[in-house]
Amino acid sequence: MADSSGQERTEEATPRKRQQARRKGTVARSHDLTSALVIIALLLVLPSAVGNLGSSMMSSVHGGLRTVPHDLGSASINRYFWSVFQGPALALMPILLVATGVGLAANFAQGGLRA
């Protein structure tokens, strides 16, 4: 009756109840813990990634200004766009991969594969 009356439980859940809750996906997850782990991981990765991103952006701007296409066909605009944004996009990948990987790992560690 502790469920319906709002009273606190006096005893720990049995291993069977924990297993059933995990199977149903009703396990408590901390969004704050996940966010904190992602922020810590990004603080460790950002110093090296920002330097790489800055140099990539500078070379992209220089190269983009040097190689502006004269014809406005879709193929030449496509090539130009890719040549200008390829470097910065690839420089952002470590940041995105670390944030995604740590977030997924933290959620998995807290409750398994179920959402």
Image (spheres, grey):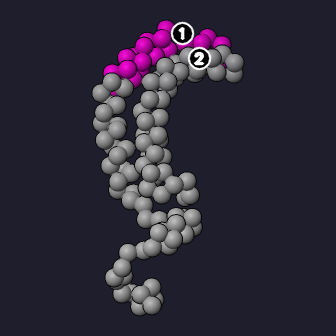
- Which portion, as a residue range, is magenta? 50-72
Q: Is residue 100 left or right of residue 114?
A: left
| Front residue (pair 70, 58) | 58
Rendering quarter of residue 54? top left
Does residue 5 sit above or below 81 in this rendering?
below
Along the viewing direction, whichever of 84 and 39 lies nearer the viewer: 39
Q: Residues within 10 Å of mark 1 (few under 14, many from 20)?
A: few
In this rendering, does residue 21 appear at all?
no
> The residue under label 2 is which amino acid type?
Tyr
Of 74 and 49, nearer the camera is 49
Q: Secondary structure at mark 1?
A: loop
- At horizontal 42% and vertical 49% (from top left) the residue drawn is 106
Q: Residue at x 47, y 65 (%)?
A: 27
**With 42 as the anchor, is 89 left or right in this view?**
right
Residue 43 relative to residue 21: left or right: left
Instruction: Give the residue number, with chain letter if any, for mark 2.
Output: 80
